[in-house]
C-alpha cells in the first residue's frame, strides 16, 4: 500500500484528468479507492492519520474529478459513496436510524457562489427572493449522535461508516457538558441530537503534558486526543479526559420543534446542550464569504480547532425539498480553510531527555510565521520519523499547524537540499549523561520500540530534573511556587537533588544552610508561601503519592488502581518487595488486578527493586503521610462483575447505587453488552432492558440487587 499521497505514474497519476486514457482512469480509481480506504481507517479507527487533511482532500477531489469524466468507471467501492470507516471492534454497534452523513466541500470562493446558485436553481427560487443561509464554524472533532428519549439520554454513538457506529454511551455519559436529561419545554419524545466532541487547546496541551510525564501516548493533535479519549474501553479513563461538545444537527426526531436550522439549534441551547456561539444567519454569498474571512482571522484565538465554515440553508422545508446526493446533503456545504503551512530552514535537531529517559528529537527552525503564530520548534516524534522523512540539518522543510497545536514537519523540499547535507544519525548516547541510549524490543511482538531511552536512570541529570518537575506537578504533589523553572534552578544549585530535599527546605533555610529569600526573583513573602504550600502536602492521598513517584507506565488511573488495591504505602512496599520473585503469590496478585497488565506490573516491580528508589520512598515517608483510599472489596458477591443500572431506582439514587457497587468491587457500565453480568432495572426501564433480554443477561430488580449485595 502506497503511503504517500503522491500519485504514481504507472496508473496515470501524474496525468491531468482531462488527458487520462480509460485504462489509466480505471487503474487510478482503483488505486485511489484503496488509498482513501487506507487513510480513512487510519483517521477514523486508529485516530492516527498519516497524511495531512489537505493531501487527503486532494485524493478525494481527484477521485471525484475522474469519476465525473468517466462515470461508467465508478467503482462499487468508490470512496465517494462512503463516509468514514466501518466501526472498530471493542464497542457494540449502533445502527443509525437516520444516516449520519458527510458534507460536500468548498475550497475556493467560487465554490460557495456555485453552491448558492445550485440551491436556487434546484428550488427554482428567483434571484430576488431572499434565501437565508446559516454560517457556523466547522469543529475539528468527531461527530456523535445523542439519543434522548423523553428527554433522557439513552444512547450515544459515533458516526462509524455513517450507517453503523459504535455505542459509546458509557463514555459520553462522563462528559460534563452533555446533559443526561434535557430541561425546559418542547423537547420531542425522541430527539437525536448530533454534534461534535472536541478538546480545547489548553486541555489538549495539559493532557499531553501529563501523558508524556507518565510515559504514555502523546497525541498529535486535539482531534486525535478527543477520539482516543472517547474510544477508551474503560469509561473511567474517558471521565478524566476534558472533552467538550457542540450540538449542531439532528437525526431521528419524533416531531421537529422548529422551522429553521437556527431555531432548532437555539432550542438545543435552551434544553441545556452546549451550542456554538458563532452561528450567524447570512443572506447571499458575499455575507457568507465575509463571515468566512472574519472567522479565519479569529481561528487562532478560538481556543479549539476548526477546519472551516459550514453553510446550511436555514429553512427546514427547503432543506427537505433539497434532500441529499450520495453521501452529502444538497442544502449544506463545508468551506474548508487552507492548511496552515510555511517553508523554513531546519537549523538543528535537538535531543531532549524526558523523565523516563526517552530521547525526543525537536526540530530547531529558522523562525517563521504559520497561521499567525511564530514557530521556531517542531516535533519530529522519534528516530523512525526522521528516517522516514529523511530530514537533514540544513534542509528546507514544510511546517504545518493544520489543526495541530504542536507544529509538525510535513516534508522536506528536496530540491532545496544543500549539497553537503548528510542523513541525520540519531545519537546512541544520552546527551545529558553519556549513558547508552537503547531501543527496547518487545518480547512478544519482536518489534522495536519507537523510542530510544537513556539507560542512566538516576545518574542522568536530565531524568532527575524531569522527575522532580513531575513530582511537584499539578496532578502529583501540586506544590505552588515550585514551577519547572525554579526546580531546574534549585537542582542546578544543588539545593534540591531529589524529592525528599523539598521537605527539608524550611529546616535548612532556618539553619542558615541556604538562603532562599535572597535568590533572584524570590523574596521573603514568596518563600513563606512556598513553605506553607509544602507544609500542606505533608498529607497526601496515596494515589497522588504513587503517581508522583514517576514510575514508568504509571499514570493517574493506574496509580489509583494500585492505591485502591493495596490500601497503604506500607502494604504496597512490602508486596512489591515480595513480587521481585516472579513465581511469588505477590507477583501473581499484582498481575491479576483489573487494570494492571504485565507491562505495568513489571514497571512497578522494577521500580521497587531499585535500592535507590526504595531509599527515596523511605526518606519521603519520614516527612509525608500518604492517606489510604477507601479500598475496593474483592470478596463480595459482585466483585469483578459488570453491572448496568437502568430505569428509575426507588431506594437509591443512580449515583449512590453506582458508588456502592464500585465500592463492592463491581464495574458499572452505561450500556448493556455480552460482557454485562447484571442489569438492575428500576421503573420505566427501556431499551437496555430489552437488550438484556436479547443477550440473555441476568436482570435484577432493585430489591434483588439489595439482597444480592447483602445490604
Ligand atoms: S453538519 C448532514 N455542522 O463535519 C450534515 N457538521 O465533513 C451534518 N462538522 O460529519 C453535519 N462541525 O462531523 C455540521 N457545524 C457543523 C460541523 C460539522 C463539524 C463535522 C461533522 C460532519 C463533518 C462533515
Image (cartoon, rainbow, N blue to C red):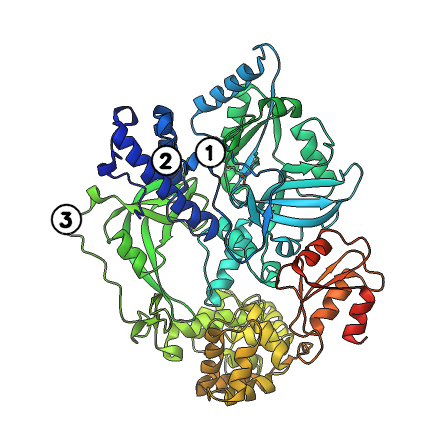
Q: Looking at this view, is 256 or 254 the one in front?
A: 254
Q: Residue 701 appears at what percent x and percent y?
A: 80, 64
Whether the residues at callouts 1 and 3 have beta carbons within 8 Å, the answer is no
**Could you tell me which residue is drawn at 34 percent across and 76 percent down?**
455
**Picture quadrant of ligand 1:** top right
Separation (CA) of disc 2 from disc 3: 32 Å
Residue 684 vs residue 355, the one in the foreground: 684
* Of the image marks 1 and 3, the number of the one nearer the N terminus: 1
Real-space CA distance between mark 1 and mark 3, rounded to the nearest whole angstrom: 38 Å
| Mark 2 or 1, closer to the camera | 2
Residue at the image point whose x is 56% and y is 76% from the top = 546
Q: Contact, CB < 8 Å: mark 2 with mark 3?
A: no
> Under 8 Å from ligand 1: the CB of mark 1?
no
**Which percent across, then down, holds residue 472?**
54, 70
Task: Tell me if mark 2 has few (under 14), some (14-19) or many (20+) residues whose alpha carbon lies within 10 angstroms of its own.
Answer: some
1 or 3: mark nearer the eye: 1
Q: In which image quadrant can residue 589 be found?
A: bottom right
Badge 1 marks a residue whose secondary structure is: strand
Dot 1 crowding, Cα within 10 Å, few <14, some 14–19, many 20+: many
Residue 573, given in percent of the width and then of the height, sits at: 55, 86
Left or right of 167 on screen, residue 11? left
Give the residue number, with chain letter if any, for mark 1.
Answer: 336
Q: Secondary structure at mark 3?
A: loop
Residue linked to disc 2: 58
Q: Is residue 456 left or right of residue 647?
A: left
Left or right, 381 with reference to 227:
left
Whether the residue carrying mark 2 lies under 8 Å from ligand 1 is answered with no
Element type at mark 2: helix
Disc with the residue nearer the chain's start (2 vs 1): 2
Whether residue 559 is visible, yes or no, is yes
* Residue 512 visible in the shown view: no
Badge 3 is on which residue?
A: 419
Amino acid at each position: 500500500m502506497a503511503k504517500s499521497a503522491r500519485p504514481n505514474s504507472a496508473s496515470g497519476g501524474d496525468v491531468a484528468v482531462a488527458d487520462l486514457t480509460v485504462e489509466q482512469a480505471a487503474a487510478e480509481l482503483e488505486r485511489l479507492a484503496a488509498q482513501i480506504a487506507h487513510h480513512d481507517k487510519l483517521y477514523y479507527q486508529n485516530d492516527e492519520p498519516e497524511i495531512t487533511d489537505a493531501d487527503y482532500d486532494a485524493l478525494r477531489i481527484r477521485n471525484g474529478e475522474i469519476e465525473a469524466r468517466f462515470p461508467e468507471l465508478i467503482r462499487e467501492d468508490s470512496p465517494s459513496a462512503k463516509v468514514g470507516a466501518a466501526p472498530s471492534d471493542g464497542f457494540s454497534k449502533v445502527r443509525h436510524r437516520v444516516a449520519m452523513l458527510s458534507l460536500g466541500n468548498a475550497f475556493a470562493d467560487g465554490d460557495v457562489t456555485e453552491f448558492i446558485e445550485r440551491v436556487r436553481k434546484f428550488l427554482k427560487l428567483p434571484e430576488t427572493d431572499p434565501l437565508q443561509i446559516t454560517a457556523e464554524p466547522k469543529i475539528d472533532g468527531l461527530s456523535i449522535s445523542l439519543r434522548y428519549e423523553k428527554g433522557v439520554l439513552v444512547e450515544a454513538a459515533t458516526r462509524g461508516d455513517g450507517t453503523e457506529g459504535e455505542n459509546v454511551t458509557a463514555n459520553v455519559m462522563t462528559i460534563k457538558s452533555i446533559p443526561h436529561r434535557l430541561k425546559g419545554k418542547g423537547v420531542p419524545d425522541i430527539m437525536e441530537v448530533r454534534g461534535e466532541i472536541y478538546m480545547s487547546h489548553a486541555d489538549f496541551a495539559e493532557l499531553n503534558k501529563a501523558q508524556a510525564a507518565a510515559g504514555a501516548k502523546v497525541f498529535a493533535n486535539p482531534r486525535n486526543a478527543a477520539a482516543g479519549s472517547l474510544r477508551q474501553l474503560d469509561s473511567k479513563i474517558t471521565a478524566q479526559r476534558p472533552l467538550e461538545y457542540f450540538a449542531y444537527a439532528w437525526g431521528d426526531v419524533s416531531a421537529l420543534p422548529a422551522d429553521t436550522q437556527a431555531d432548532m439549534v437555539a432550542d438545543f441551547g435552551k434544553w441545556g446542550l452546549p451550542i456554538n456561539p458563532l452561528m450567524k444567519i447570512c443572506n447571499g454569498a458575499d455575507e457568507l464569504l465575509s463571515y468566512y474571512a472574519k472567522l479565519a482571522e479569529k481561528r487562532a484565538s478560538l481556543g479549539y480547532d476548526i477546519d472551516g465554515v459550514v453553510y446550511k440553508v436555514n429553512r427546514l422545508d427547503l432543506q427537505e425539498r433539497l434532500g441529499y446526493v450520495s453521501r452529502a446533503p444538497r442544502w449544506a456545504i463545508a468551506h474548508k480553510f487552507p492548511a496552515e503551512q510555511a517553508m523554513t530552514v531546519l537549523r538543528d535537531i535537538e535531543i531532549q531527555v524526558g523523565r523516563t529517559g526517552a530521547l525526543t528529537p525537536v526540530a530547531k527552525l529558522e523562525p517563521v510565521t504559520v497561521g499567525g503564530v511564530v514557530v521556531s520548534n517542531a516535533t519530529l516524534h522519534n528516530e523512525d520519523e526522521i528516517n522516514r522523512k529523511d530530514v537533514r540539518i540544513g534542509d528546507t522543510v514544510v511546517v504545518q499547524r493544520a489543526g495541530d497545536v504542536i507544529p509538525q514537519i510535513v516534508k522536506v523540499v528536496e530540491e532545496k537540499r544543500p549539497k553537503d547535507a548528510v542523513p541525520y544519525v540519531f545519537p546512541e548516547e544520552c546527551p545529558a549523561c553519556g549513558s547508552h541510549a537503547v531501543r527496547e524490543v518487545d518480547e512478544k511482538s519482536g518489534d522495536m520500540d519507537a523510542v530510544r531511552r537513556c539507560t542512566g536512570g538516576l545518574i542522568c541529570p536530565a531524568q532527575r530534573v524531569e522527575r522532580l518537575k513531575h513530582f511537584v506537578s499539578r496532578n502529583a504533589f501540586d506544590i505552588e511556587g515550585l514551577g519547572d523553572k525554579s526546580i531546574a534552578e534549585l537542582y542546578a544549585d544543588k539545593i534540591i537533588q531529589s524529592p525528599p530535599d523539598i521537605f527539608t527546605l524550611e529546616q535548612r533555610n532556618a539553619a542558615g544552610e541556604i538562603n532562599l529569600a535572597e535568590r533572584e526573583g524570590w523574596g521573603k513573602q514568596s518563600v513563606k508561601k512556598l513553605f506553607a504550600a509544602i507544609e500542606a502536602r505533608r498529607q497526601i492521598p496515596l494515589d497522588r503519592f504513587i503517581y508522583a513517584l514517576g514510575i514508568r507506565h504509571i499514570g493517574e488511573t493506574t496509580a489509583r488502581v494500585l492505591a485502591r488495591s493495596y490500601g497503604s504505602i506500607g502494604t504496597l512496599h512490602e508486596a512489591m518487595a515480595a513480587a521481585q520473585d516472579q513465581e511469588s503469590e505477590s507477583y501473581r496478585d499484582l498481575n491479576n488486578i483489573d487494570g494492571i497488565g504485565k507491562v505495568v506490573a513489571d514497571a512497578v516491580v522494577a521500580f521497587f527493586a531499585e535500592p535507590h528508589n526504595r531509599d527515596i520512598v523511605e526518606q519521603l515517608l519520614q516527612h509525608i503521610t500518604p492517606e489510604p483510599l477507601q479500598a475496593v472489596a474483592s470478596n463480595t458477591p459482585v466483585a469483578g462483575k459488570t453491572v448496568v443500572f437502568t430505569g428509575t431506582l426507588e431506594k437509591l439514587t443512580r449515583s449512590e447505587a453506582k458508588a456502592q457497587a464500585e465500592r463492592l468491587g463491581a464495574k458499572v457500565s452505561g450500556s448493556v453488552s455480552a460482557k454485562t453480568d447484571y442489569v438492575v432495572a428500576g421503573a420505566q426501564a427501556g431499551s437496555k432492558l430489552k437488550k438484556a433480554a436479547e443477550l440473555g443477561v441476568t436482570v435484577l430488580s432493585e430489591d434483588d440487587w439489595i439482597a444480592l449485595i447483602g445490604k
